[in-house]
Amino acid sequence: MRSRRWFWPSFGLPGLVWLALFFLVPFYVILAVAMGTVDPIFRFPVPVWNPLDWDTQAFETVIDELGPGQTYGTVFIRTIGYVAIAVALSLAIGYPVAYYIARHGGRWKGLLLLGLVAPFWISYLMRMLAWVNLLQEDGLVNRSLMWLNVLDAPRTWLDGRASTVVLGLVYGYVPFLILPLYASLDRIDKNLLEAARDLGANRAAAFRRVTLPLSKPGILAGCVIVALPMFGDYYTPDLLSGSPKTSLIGNQINLYIRGGPQVTLGAALVVTLMVFLLVLMVYYLVSTARAARELR
């Protein structure tokens, strides 16, 4: 009887072991680096594994520089702004696409979903390099806009424009938002929409009162799925801008972690970013739990 009680929970053991090995252990290594020192000659990090010997100087430096107008504070605010705009644009683009596939895709649903998944077969780095070619002064974007008389001269899109970085983030991550949105919308019982229409609601009212609230878990899940990697993204600003004016917190971390005397600061920034993202994850979990209770 006791073995039967532990039979199904044991299926979660491989996942717990995986998380322990590939999340908790690396996280502890990052903490040990952040609380450690740097070799004065070779400039490589010297982790401190014993928590009793940890030095919080790196975290104190990060906290001091997180204020308004300070170095890390400016980068964090810029990152939050870029990610918020990119997530909003991704939602504005992705929701109609997911809604169309779920409600009007018909027998073409599989093919349409395949079209969404197809970009994943190409490396993210290669897709960003393709954008670099498109946005060069003699690229297709400038030539097309000049042919349409929108521009009278080539525009330098890759010279540190915030709009280019944000659109690059949207392009890179919007498919990750569409898929959970589609799954959420496809599960909505059509009888609920018919009942709303029978009660006198027009299409807009039925969407606002039925479809939109029921798709909230999918909206939150999609926003979380795209926001988390956006916060750590550093390829997109490097490739589409390369300017300090558009650097994100991921660029700052990458700069420090790659070597030099500030590796401990880079590790401290990683931990700080993880704490911030943990707050977002807690909000997501609380919101989805509340939505699940409302649906019962």
Image (cartoon, rainbow, N blue to C red):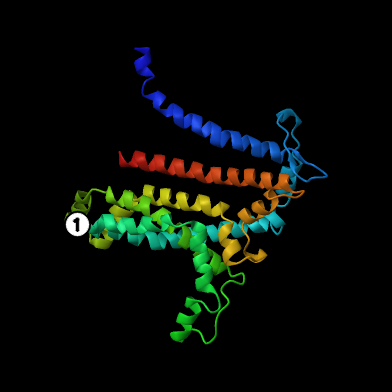
Residue at 40 percent across and 62 percent down: it is 92
In the displayed structure image, the side of residue 235 where residue 121 appears, left or right: left
Extreme right residue here?
41
Task: Report the front residue among 193 and 154.
Answer: 154
Q: Secondary structure at mark 1?
A: helix
Quarter of the N terminus within the rendering: top left
In the displayed structure image, the side of residue 156 where residue 220 appears, left or right: left
In the displayed structure image, the side of residue 94 where residue 33 appears, left or right: right
* Residue under numbered circle 1: 197
Q: Label 1: few (<14), some or many (≥20) within 10 Å?
A: some
Task: Report the front residue among 192 and 224.
Answer: 224
Residue 280 sits above or below residue 47 on the image: below
In the displayed structure image, the side of residue 130 where residue 288 appears, left or right: left
Tell me if residue 208 can be seen.
Answer: no
Residue 45 sits above or below residue 122 on the image: above
Number of dots carrying numbers = 1
Q: Amino acid at mark 1?
A: Arg
